[in-house]
Image: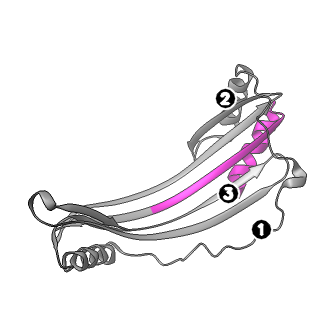
């Protein structure tokens, strides 16, 4: 992804941009939702996208596309858009002196891939635990999901930064009480 964003920034400069930045984002996620002990839905997604922002004087434009898009055509389109955009004196890249150069590892990534059957079991367990609470009379459902992804940012000032992160979540929504005294609550 680093090569892709630096190629976009270079293409923008060749197309006439005074400055530019580009971002590439890649992600993958999966989730399972259940209600009353039965699977209601499953989902899975994968994506890889890029975004390019170009500056010409005090004019700016942004374009986004799939990562497979041609850098030259994206850059040319963004520069053409910037030429007809209104001036905005508050847009611009950060001063190069303010850019971070030594990025700390924030330990945001766990490479564990959670299979769909484990997500299903996690959602079922969360719902069962909520339904076991005294006074809980119904369930609006429970879900479990997992995802991982990464981001790379490059600027025409020479900055390149990146990170990868993962996430895991469970949520449950249940109803307690009877008749007009029913209340719903949610826990994530």
Residue bearing the label numbered 3: 152
Seen at 25% across and 80% down, the residue is 129
Q: Which residue lies furthest to the front in this view?
A: 181
- Where residue 112 sits: x, y (%)? 48, 78
Say whether marks 1 and 2 touch (CB < 8 Å): no
Say whether residue 81 is visible.
Answer: yes
**Direction from residue 122 to residue 151 in the image, left or right:** right
Residue stretch in magenta: 2-28
Residue bearing the label numbered 1: 103
Position of the C terminus by quadrant: bottom left
**Direction from residue 42 to residue 96 in the image, left or right:** right
Say whether marks 1 and 3 touch (CB < 8 Å): no
Vertical position of residue 88 compared to residue 175: above or below: above
Position of the N terminus by quadrant: bottom right
Q: Is residue 174 magenta?
A: no
Which secondary structure, mark 3?
strand
Vertical position of residue 144 compared to residue 21: above or below: below
- Where residue 30 sits: x, y (%)? 38, 64
Quadrant position of residue 2: bottom right
Q: Distance between the residues labelled 1 and 2?
A: 32 Å
- Where residue 165 sits: x, y (%)? 57, 68
Task: Say which of 124 and 53 sits in front.
Answer: 124
Q: Which callout, 3 or 2, points at the residue further toward the start of the chain?
A: 2
Vertical position of residue 71 compared to residue 166: above or below: above
Q: How crowded is mark 3: few (under 14 residues within 10 Å), some or many (20 or more)?
A: many
Residue bearing the label numbered 2: 77
Number of numbered labels in the structure image: 3
Seen at 74% across and 44% down, the residue is 21
């Amino acid at each position: 992804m680093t090569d892709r964003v630096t190629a976009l920034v270079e293409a923008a400069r060749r197309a006439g941009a005074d400055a530019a930045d580009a971002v590439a984002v890649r992600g993958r996620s999966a989730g399972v939702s259940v209600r009353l002990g039965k699977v209601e839905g499953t989902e899975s997604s994968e994506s890889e996208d890029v975004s390019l922002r170009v500056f010409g004087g005090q004019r700016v434009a942004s374009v986004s596309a799939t990562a497979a898009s041609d850098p030259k055509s994206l850059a040319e389109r963004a520069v053409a858009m910037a030429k007809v955009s209104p001036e905005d004196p508050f847009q611009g890249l950060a001063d190069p002196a303010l850019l971070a150069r030594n990025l700390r590892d924030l330990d945001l990534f766990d490479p564990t891939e959670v299979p769909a059957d484990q997500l299903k079991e996690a959602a079922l367990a969360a719902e069962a635990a909520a339904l076991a609470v005294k006074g809980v009379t119904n369930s609006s459902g429970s879900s479990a999901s997992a995802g991982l992804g990464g981001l790379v940012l490059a600027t025409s000032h020479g900055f390149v930064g990146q990170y990868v992160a993962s996430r895991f979540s469970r949520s449950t929504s249940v109803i307690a009480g009877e008749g007009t005294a029913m209340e719903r609550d949610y826990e994530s």
